[in-house]
Amino acid sequence: MTKLIPMISAEEIQIKIKYAAELISRDYKNKKLVLVGILKGSIIFLSDLTREITIEHEIDLVGTSSYSGTETTGSIKFTKLPDIQLEGKDILIVEDIVDTGTTLTALMRYFQTLKPASVKICALINKNERRELPIDVHYSCFDIEKGFIVGYGLDYNEKYRNLPAIFDLKL
Ligand code: IMP
Ligand code: MG
């Protein structure tokens, strides 16, 4: 039987997002900040984060599917490319969770080819259990050691994204 064990409350999430947004608003003052959310897991986090950031910025979204795609963009396959011109901009990738690091390593490589002024990472969750590639997560709201978590955008087979808090999923 599937069990959802409460792990991070909705209130705790909002506190950490406010703090991350403060740091971002300070660090990117007078820069050309673009938040680039990774579909679909980051959309809820992105929508809260953008409203807490107090400096002017743009938003875009990219979609990725498999790790072993055959596209020329690297080792990930894009289901949606960025819409806005990113050359000379300060890209902040917004991701739900960093696990092995495969997705972000490939995305960092891709964004660098667009000649931005900078590329950094903001993740809701930094999970260390299965890290295979070293990833510098510049802004992270929560660090967890292990487990499979759902809620607040994170899914298990496309379910549970709507939960307002984060739960440990026990199958
Ligand atoms: P990575 O390329 O292994 O770092 O994978 C990151 C992606 O795997 C995330 O964007 C999620 O879509 C998914 N993922 C990894 N761990 C979890 C988890 O605990 N819950 C839900 N999705 C996860
Ligand atoms: Mg994801």
Image: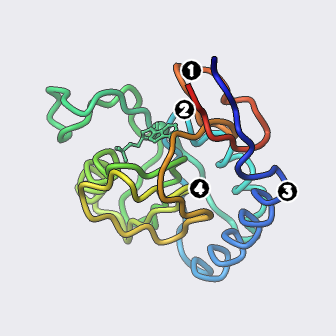
How far, Cα to Cα, is label 3 from label 1? 24 Å
- Residue 23 falls in which quadrant of the image? bottom right
Q: Is 43 located above or below residue 105 in the figure?
A: above
In the picture provided, is 15 more to the left or to the right than 98?
A: right
The percent position of residue 95, horizontal first and vertical second, equals 51, 49
Secondary-structure class at tag 2:
loop
Q: Name the residue under label 4.
A: 124
Q: Which of 158 and 150 is in front in this view?
A: 150
| Tag of residue 158 | 1
> Where's residue 57, x and y in %?
63, 61
Instruction: Return the disc, 2 or 1, that comes first in the chain's sequence.
Output: 2
State the image quarter where residue 121 is shown.
bottom left
Task: Indicate whether 150 appears above or below 96.
Answer: above
Measure how far apart labels 4 and 2 are at the Cα level: 13 Å
Find disc 3 in the rendering and name its residue: 11
Residue ID at (62%, 73%): 24
Which class describes the residues within 10 Å of circle 2: few (<14), some (14-19), or many (20+)?
Answer: some
Q: Which of marks 3 and 4 is nearer the N terminus?
A: 3
Sequence order check, earlier mark of 3 and 1: 3
Quick one: 161 or 35, which is closer to the camera?
161
The residue that label 2 is drawn on is 40
